[in-house]
Image (cartoon, helix red, strand yellow):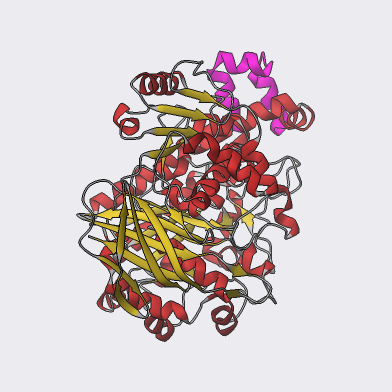
């Protein structure tokens, strides 16, 4: 088993070494500079049972780098805005000097990055983070200081027009030489004035940037293989789809198919337009991250996702006590076969960061998880319900990702156990659905299906004709054949926007009649996540009765759980918690199994075998 599939405890910002030992931190820092790690330092970390993660920023050039004489040449590789100014990365609110947006079309800049990466490989580093994989193209807008319009970007588009007659026709360009004239001034003028032409430009660059990153990752993996290294390659995917509607396709989910596992900076955001206004973050019970853990687990590697709160969250929560909120997020991660990165808050001192973001109880739960690590690693599901996440349809509808989150949230709150199946779009990643991917499920749910590919349409029709059920929460090309239910109202977005119980029930109504995978819990604020491990069944119980006003979690006692159950009753039902282990009485009522958990405060683990 690869090391990153095993349990890890992660500090987002590097902790002082003595703190890392105290908390059981195994990966001490998500954004460490490769230049700070030599072979001896890596070997020392390994001797202490720790892994080493380093990061190379492929967008941002900070003053700590460009003010060094040996790196001043990199200023020539900075991208430009649509007016010709040096482009910047605007989210570095804690940096006192400009942070420039680098153009990854620059071979010079890529060679600079590869040199840093090769040093990390030689040092024996365990994991490389490509930060931010969306490239400077993912920040492109026609606004002041936003990138996408340097001579490298403009020339690449001209090359595209020159070699593709259909692109020239769509752009209304007869002579490419004319758009190159006078340092591309005619091209820039048209990009500023012609919205349709501008969108053609963005569409081209999004595809080109994705292909370029594929090539860049291939170069990295070639170096890793040549060194016989086992280094994992990851990327921090901010929001994993959250900013798709406002930032474009490069902020979608397709990147998860290219890397070993997903590292997410995340937040729960209702309206992307409020992100910069400080109105983004929702606390529990709505602000759970189950949907993202499930989506990340659907990528080709099936590896656990590592998630930490997005940089805006600690700044928003400054002055408010939220330590129990972070405790629940830590527990939620491991309950959903994920990993949580604590100790995240840039621009403050070590003690402030620790006090605000790392619950003392993390120490106890770290020991608990390690003592029972077999129930947090290498798990499988027996779920008969799946959400299909077709990237083609999600990209076509800017709100498609939010429809997915609404559906995933409603299912989790309703007690339904489900898997997520990611399929590509035939643009960024292949879009075929293997028949065996669908065959094990009684029903497949599509939060958005308006732009399925022909192959996806054919696969879903065949699945329905063979007895499966397809429930689509949008218009779609599937037709009205047997096994297909189409719901063309706004119940998903209603739930997303209003978060009302009646909207949740409207989402669940068509599922109840076709799927029997609902776990019933006597208290609806206790969620159960069910896995299999060999002959055992594992249930993680998490109590979401969190009160933001005083940062408390209301303990739950005598929580009854009813599981759908086939076959003989288990011979043992054990409840494991920080208080120890207790054997539970079990009842059987036809196809249901029931037991009562004495306390969920705020988490309990039940093992049936």
Q: Residue at x 56, y 55 (%)?
A: 74
Q: Is residue 361 visible?
A: yes
Rendered view: 387 above or below 168 = below
Left of 172 or right of it: where is 376?
left
Residue 443 lies in the magenta-colored region: no
- In this view, 10 is above or below 171: below
Q: Which residues are magenta?
A: 155-184
Tell me what residue is drawn at x 60 percent, y 39 percent.
506
- Residue 130: where, in percent of width, then height? 45, 53
Residue 400 % position (x, y)? 59, 36
Residue placed at 52% from the left, 38% from the top?
209
Q: Answer left or right for 401 relative to 116.
A: right
The answer to whether residue 229 shows anywhere in this view is no
Residue 147 vs residue 235, the one in the foreground: 235
Q: Nearer the viewer, residue 168 or 126?
A: 126
Q: Work out whether 156 lies above or below 368.
A: above
Q: Nearer the viewer, residue 502 or 363?
A: 502
- Counting from the top left corner in percent of width and height, residue 140 is at 65, 42
To which quarter of the image does residue 442 belong?
top left
């Amino acid at each position: 088993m690869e090391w990153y599939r095993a349990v890890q405890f992660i500090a987002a910002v590097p902790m002082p070494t003595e703190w890392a030992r105290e908390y059981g931190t195994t990966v001490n820092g998500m954004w460490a500079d490769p230049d700070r790690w030599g072979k001896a330092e890596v070997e020392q970390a390994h001797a202490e049972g720790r892994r080493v993660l380093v990061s190379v920023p492929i967008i941002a050039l900070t003053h700590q780098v460009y003010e060094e004489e040996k790196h001043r040449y990199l200023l020539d590789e900075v991208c430009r805005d649509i007016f010709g100014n040096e482009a910047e990365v605007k989210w570095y609110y804690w940096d006192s000097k400009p942070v420039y947006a680098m153009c990854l079309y620059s071979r010079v800049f890529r060679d600079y990055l590869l040199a840093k990466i090769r040093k990390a490989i030689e040092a024996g580093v365990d994991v490389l983070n490509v930060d931010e994989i969306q490239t400077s193209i993912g920040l492109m807008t026609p606004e002041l200081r936003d990138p996408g319009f340097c001579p490298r970007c403009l020339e690449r588009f001209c090359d595209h027009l020159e070699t593709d007659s259909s692109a020239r026709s769509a752009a209304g360009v007869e002579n490419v030489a004319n758009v190159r004239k006078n340092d591309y001034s005619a091209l820039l003028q048209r990009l500023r004035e012609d919205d349709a032409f501008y969108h053609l430009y963005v569409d081209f660059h999004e595809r080109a940037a994705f292909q370029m990153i594929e090539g860049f990752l291939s170069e990295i993996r070639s170096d890793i293989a040549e060194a016989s290294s086992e280094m994992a390659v990851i990327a921090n995917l901010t929001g994993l789809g959250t900013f798709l509607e406002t930032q474009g396709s490069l902020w979608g989910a397709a990147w998860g198919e290219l890397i070993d596992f997903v590292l997410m900076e995340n937040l729960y955001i209702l309206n992307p337009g409020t992100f910069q206004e400080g109105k983004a973050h929702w606390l529990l019970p709505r602000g759970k991250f189950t949907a993202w853990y499930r989506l990340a687990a659907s990528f080709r590697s099936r590896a656990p996702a590592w998630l930490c709160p997005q940089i805006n969250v600690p700044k928003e929560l400054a002055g408010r006590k939220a330590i129990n909120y972070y405790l629940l997020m830590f527990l939620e991660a491991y309950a959903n076969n994920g990993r949580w990165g604590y100790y995240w808050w840039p621009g403050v001192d070590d003690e402030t960061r620790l006090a605000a973001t790392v619950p003392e109880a993390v120490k106890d739960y770290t020991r608990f998880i390690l003592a029972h690590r077999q129930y947090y690693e290498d798990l499988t599901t027996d779920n008969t319900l799946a959400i299909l996440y077709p990237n083609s349809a999600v990209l076509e509808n800017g709100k498609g990702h939010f429809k997915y989150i609404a559906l995933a949230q409603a299912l989790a709150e309703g007690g339904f156990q489900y898997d997520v199946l990611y399929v590509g779009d035939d643009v960024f990643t292949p879009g075929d659905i293997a028949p065996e991917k669908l065959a094990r499920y009684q029903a497949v749910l599509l939060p958005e299906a308006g732009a399925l590919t022909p192959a996806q349409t054919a696969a879903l029709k065949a699945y329905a004709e063979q007895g499966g059920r397809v429930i689509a929460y949008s218009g779609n090309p599937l037709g009205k054949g047997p096994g297909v239910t189409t719901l063309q109202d706004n119940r998903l977005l209603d739930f997303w926007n209003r978060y009302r119980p009646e909207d949740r029930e409207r989402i669940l109504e068509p599922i109840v009649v076709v799927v029997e995978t609902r776990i019933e819990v006597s208290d609806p604020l206790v969620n159960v996540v069910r896995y299999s491990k060999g002959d055992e069944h594992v249930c993680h119980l998490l109590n979401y009765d969190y009160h933001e006003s005083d940062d408390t979690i209301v303990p739950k006692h005598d929580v009854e759980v009813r599981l759908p159950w086939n076959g003989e009753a288990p011979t043992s039902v054990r409840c494991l918690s920080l208080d120890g282990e207790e054997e539970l009485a079990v009842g059987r009522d036809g196809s249901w199994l029931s037991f009562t958990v004495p306390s969920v405060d705020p988490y309990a683990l039940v093992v049936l075998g």
